[in-house]
Image (cartoon, helix red, strand yellow):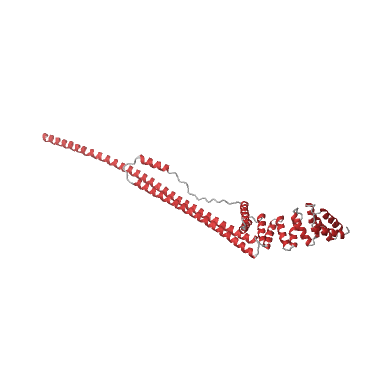
Amino acid sequence: MSVINQMLKDLDKRQTEHQNATNLAVSAPTKNSSTKLVLVIVTIIVILNVAGIFAWQLYNENQQLRMQVQQESIRLTTEQNLAASKVNKISAAKLAATKAASAIVASRLPSSNAKAQNNSALASNLQQKNESKVSSVVATVTEKSAALVNTAEQQVVDNIAKTKLELELELEPEPKLEPEPKAKLAAESANETPQAKPSLTISRTQLSPQALAVNKISEAEQAMERNNLAKAEALFEEVLLVIPEHETARKQLAALWYGKKYFRDAVNLLSQGIALAPQAEAMRLMSARIYYEQGQPRQAYNVLRPIKASNSTEIQILLANASAELNEHNSAITAYRKLITLEPDVGRWWLGVAVSLDSLGNFVPARDAYKQAITRNNLSTSAMQFARQRLIELGE
């Protein structure tokens, strides 16, 4: 029995050793396989995190690019609207100036039927010229705006296409990301400098009214030298549209109308100038001459009376003649005495004083004035005979 027990014990011992060896053999591979599984899971998680981060960066860049494209489109639309508004303002200002010029022509220029038609034609021509200029400016600005918008849109489309291509290339699976493409991309992005914003600038050089008047007067004088009176007349009218108080243009235009025998128109034009400048002696003298030559001494006298203290010989002569014809002898005596002060050696002035004094019954001073006229010895033969005859009649 002891031998059997001993054998059984040996068998149990061997089985126990065999089982332990088997467990050891099984447990070692199990431990090794679980470690590998953990490593694989960690690697997958790291890869997924890296891929997520990379995808997030790409998404952010794509969103920024879309925002840039939208901002560029909004900016281009705003600039186009600004350019269109500027063109509309320029058009409205030009049309308003044209209407104002037409109104000034209608209110300031003479009112005769023939000249009114010429003035309306002039205003129409000016309006057509201004409208044509406005149309050309609008067309030019529109073309430039369209070209600018097309260029900007093409640039935006090119940028979008380029960005899409870069995203597609970056999203392709690569075995390994090397630092060289990243550095290259960084260098390219650094080299891409932002292009200057396209802008449309409309510059206009506008002359001052005085400079414009000087140019128009010069052109009108050249036209008169070439005997192109119609052009000169139109230029003088344009000057008066810009500067209504321009005396030279008004006198020249009145002279042209007087040459065409538009007497009423010339007088009305000068009257408007006198209303703007009451002490303008030259325009009063021209107006008075037209009245006097048309047999209207009263109107000539009324025009010259406000400047009767003038030192102009021409004004005093015309004032004295008109006064004598109207039997305004006191005014005639004043004018002749002014002439004697200006030219004391002229016998005609003494004779004029003598005649006016004689007409008023002041015979003693009239006789002295006749003597002074004869003494100057520069009267005509008939005037000399008249003066001597009156001296004899007055008791000399």
- Residue 222: % across, % down: 62, 54
Q: Is residue 323 above or below residue 203?
A: below
Residues 24 and 70: in front is 70
Q: Residue furthest front?
A: 381
Q: As drawn, which residue projects farthest toward the bottom?
A: 113
Q: Is residue 140 left or right of residue 120?
A: left
The residue sitting at the right extreme is 395
At 55% across and 58% down in the image, what residue appears? Answer: 131
Q: Tell me where residue 135 appears, x and y as whole percent.
A: 53, 57
**Place of residue 73 in the rendered image (x, y in percent of width and height, measured from the top left):** 45, 52
Q: Is residue 218 left or right of residue 337?
A: left
Q: Nearer the viewer, residue 86 or 342?
A: 342
Q: Quadrant of residue 4?
A: top left
Residue at horizontal 27 percent and vertical 40 percent from the top: 36
* On-image quarter of the C terminus: bottom right
Q: Locate residue 387, reporting x and y percent.
A: 83, 58
Q: Is residue 10 left or right of residue 95?
A: left
Quadrant, the N terminus = top left
- Residue 131 seen anywhere in this rendered image of the structure: yes
Residue 362 shows in this picture:
no
Closer to the camera in the image, 310 or 25: 310
How many labels sit on residues?
A: 0
Q: Quadrant of residue 282?
A: bottom right
Q: Nearer the viewer, residue 53 or 226?
A: 226
